[in-house]
């Protein structure tokens, strides 16, 4: 059996107005994790969420992201940026070289609050759930100007994503869960 070498810029790319994901190593390669390179555009907020079965690892390659990986004292439904853990943990502004590990059941989120894209390496276990999730999410994001929030929720339900706060994307992240500007 041979290994796999994926040169810079190579891999299967999925690109929409809201995200760019490059599959580097997948379950099809016999790997125990899925490994992606993800470009996080300015204003993109994945929203706080949990997974009951998945473990995730994020490593920031370029740029800055606000990240969270803890159970807050109080969960709020609109914003995670003000959450605090019982031990005093708060959201962290993480730059290149920072990493975040997320065990099953742990609330987590990331957002790009800057005016420049960020790039991260993302690994998830077990494969291929996140691979299929990204493929279907890109299809939903590609189907017009407004994101179908019902289709996104059905996708989350199928792939073990329990959303706590809304996914938002846009230049200032001042968008509601359907992708429309907030009043």
Image (tube, helix red, strand yellow):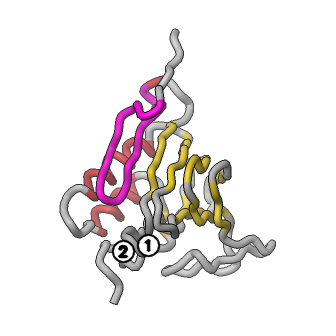
Query: In the image, residue 146 lies at what x, y percent?
Result: 23, 69
Q: Is residue 75 visible?
A: yes
* Magenta extent: 8-28
Q: Mark 2 or mark 1: which comes first in sequence?
A: 1
Magenta run includes residue 19: yes
Query: In the image, residue 73 lies at what x, y percent?
Result: 70, 78
Q: Residue placed farthest to the left in the image?
A: 144
Q: Residue placed farthest to the front in the image?
A: 116
| Residue visible at 49% across and 81% down in the picture | 78
Magenta run includes residue 39: no
- The relative height of residue 155 versus residue 148 in the rendered view (above or below) is above
Dividing the picture into quadrants, the one containing residue 82 is bottom right
Residue picked out by circle 1: 166
Query: In the image, residue 88 lies at what x, y percent?
Result: 78, 75
Label 1: few (<14), some (14–19) or many (≥20) C-alpha neighbours in 10 Å: many
> Does the CB distance between marks 2 and 1 fall below 8 Å?
yes
Dot label at residue 11: none
Dot label at residue 177: 2
| Residue visible at 33% across and 54% down in the picture | 137
Q: Residue placed farthest to the top in the image?
A: 1
- The relative height of residue 125 versus residue 58 in the rendered view (above or below) is above
Q: Nearer the viewer, residue 135 or 154?
A: 135
Question: How many numbered badges does the structure rendering display?
Answer: 2
Q: Nearer the viewer, residue 102 or 6?
A: 6
Q: Quadrant of the C terminus?
A: bottom left
Dividing the picture into quadrants, the one containing residue 110 is bottom right
Q: Is residue 107 visible?
A: no
| Residue visible at 42% across and 37% down in the picture | 23
Q: What kind of element bears circle 2?
A: loop
CA gap between label 2 and label 1 equals 5 Å
């Amino acid at each position: 059996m041979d290994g796999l070498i994926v040169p810079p810029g190579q891999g299967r790319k999925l690109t929409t107005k809201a995200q760019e994901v490059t599959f580097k190593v997948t379950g099809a390669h016999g790997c125990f994790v899925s490994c992606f390179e993800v470009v996080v555009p300015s204003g993109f907020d994945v929203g706080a969420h949990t997974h009951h079965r998945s473990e995730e690892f994020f490593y920031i390659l370029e740029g800055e992201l606000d990240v969270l990986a803890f159970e807050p004292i109080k969960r709020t439904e609109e914003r995670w940026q003000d959450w605090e853990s019982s031990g005093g943990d708060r959201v962290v502004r993480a730059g290149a070289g920072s990493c975040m590990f997320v065990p099953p059941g742990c609330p987590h989120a990331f957002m790009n609050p800057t005016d420049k894209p960020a790039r991260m390496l993302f690994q998830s276990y077990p494969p291929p759930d996140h691979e299929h999730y990204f493929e279907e999410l890109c299809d939903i994001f590609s189907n017009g100007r407004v994101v179908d929030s019902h289709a996104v929720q059905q996708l989350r339900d199928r792939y073990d994503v329990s959303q706590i706060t809304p996914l938002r994307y846009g230049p200032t992240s001042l968008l509601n869960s359907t992708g429309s500007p907030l009043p």
